Image (spheres, helix red, strand yellow):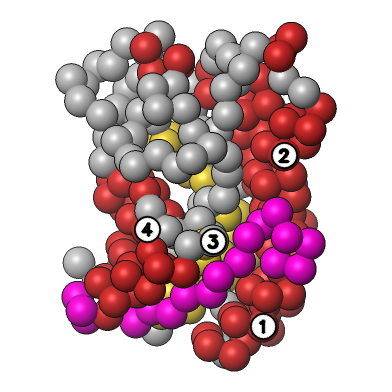
Amino acid sequence: MDLGIAEKRALVLAASRGLGLGIAKALAAEGVHVLICGRTEEKLKANVAAIVAAGGKADYVVADLADAHFVDTMLAAVHHTLGGIDILVNNAAIRKEGVLDNVSLAEWQDVLSIMLDGAFLCSKACVPSMRARGGGTIINIGGLTGHSGAKQRIHVVTGKAALAGFTKALAHDLAADHITANCVVPGLIETERGQHSAVNPQHHKDRVRLMDRFGRPDEVAAMVRYLCGPQARYITGQSMHVNGGVLMP
């Protein structure tokens, strides 16, 4: 099925593994030129090679969202490599666990700065190019716990809930520019977890799944891919849940 996004240009944050990589592959399969971002050059190179081998167009930029200059690094890559941008996928997050009494202010700020400051700064930086190109798409990758709450995740729950609000604010501010903003909210997805993630998150143990399996990254990526296409131009400000029925908001 042709989704009408061929020749679009996308920046996908945190695409070294998991959901970010799945989203980048799904967009590239539709003819989108993807620029993937992450901290590990070896993984990014391998991911680009895999996308290109499958017939897609991809490049990478090494950038750490904890670095104050990361936006400048990514913007330079966007303009040099892509020549502009149509799609931004804000996927960067760290998912630590800890009860309130044990979460330090530094840990709180670490989680929220990557998740929220990163999404804010990247969106602000990419919007001028989208306006110049006549419109665009911003996708924020939210989280189940931002809508349901969870034990031992006070910083992550707060950040993911704030992303849903950030999405609504973007939708209001950018509608006149033909830029849509939506939040895709994965449920329990089987992914490779990074060093900042709990191996077996507590909230996974507390959920009752209607479907007897975890979701796959490609199932989340399918929603992202659809929201980037011309059929989704009337969808903005929404939180789109891909969770197999584990939560019905």
Where residue 43 appears, as percent x and y from the top left, is 38, 64
Q: Do we see residue 202 in this rendering?
A: yes
Query: Looking at the image, which is closer to me, 202 or 209?
Result: 202
Q: Decide if residue 61 is on the left or right side of residue 204.
A: right
Q: Earlier in the sequence, mark 3 or mark 4?
A: 4
Where residue 237 appears, as percent x and y from the top left, is 61, 46
Please tell me whether mark 3 or mark 1 is closer to you in this view: 3
Amino acid marked by disc 4 = Leu
- Disc 4 crowd rating (10 Å Cα; few below 14, some 14-19, many 20+) is many
- Disc 3 crowd rating (10 Å Cα; few below 14, some 14-19, many 20+) is some
Residue pictured at 63% horizontal, 60% vertical: 64
Query: Looking at the image, which is closer to me, 165 or 48?
Result: 48
How far apart are labels 4 and 2 at the CA level? 23 Å
Residue ID for mark 2: 110
Amino acid marked by disc 2 = Asp
Please tell me whether mark 4 or mark 2 is closer to you in this view: 2
Residue pictured at 25% horizontal, 16% vertical: 210
Residue ID for mark 3: 39
How far apart are labels 4 and 1 at the CA level? 21 Å
Amino acid marked by disc 3 = Arg
Residue pictured at 33% horizontal, 55% vertical: 22
Residue ID for mark 4: 21
Q: Which residues are magenta?
A: 53-70
Q: Earlier in the sequence, mark 3 or mark 1?
A: 3
Residue ID for mark 1: 76
Residue pictured at 58% horizontal, 14% vertical: 152
Q: Earlier in the sequence, mark 2 or mark 3?
A: 3
| Residue farthest along the right direction in this orientation | 105
How far apart are labels 3 and 1 at the CA level? 16 Å
Please tell me whether mark 3 or mark 4 is closer to you in this view: 3
- Disc 2 crowd rating (10 Å Cα; few below 14, some 14-19, many 20+) is some
Q: Earlier in the sequence, mark 1 or mark 2?
A: 1
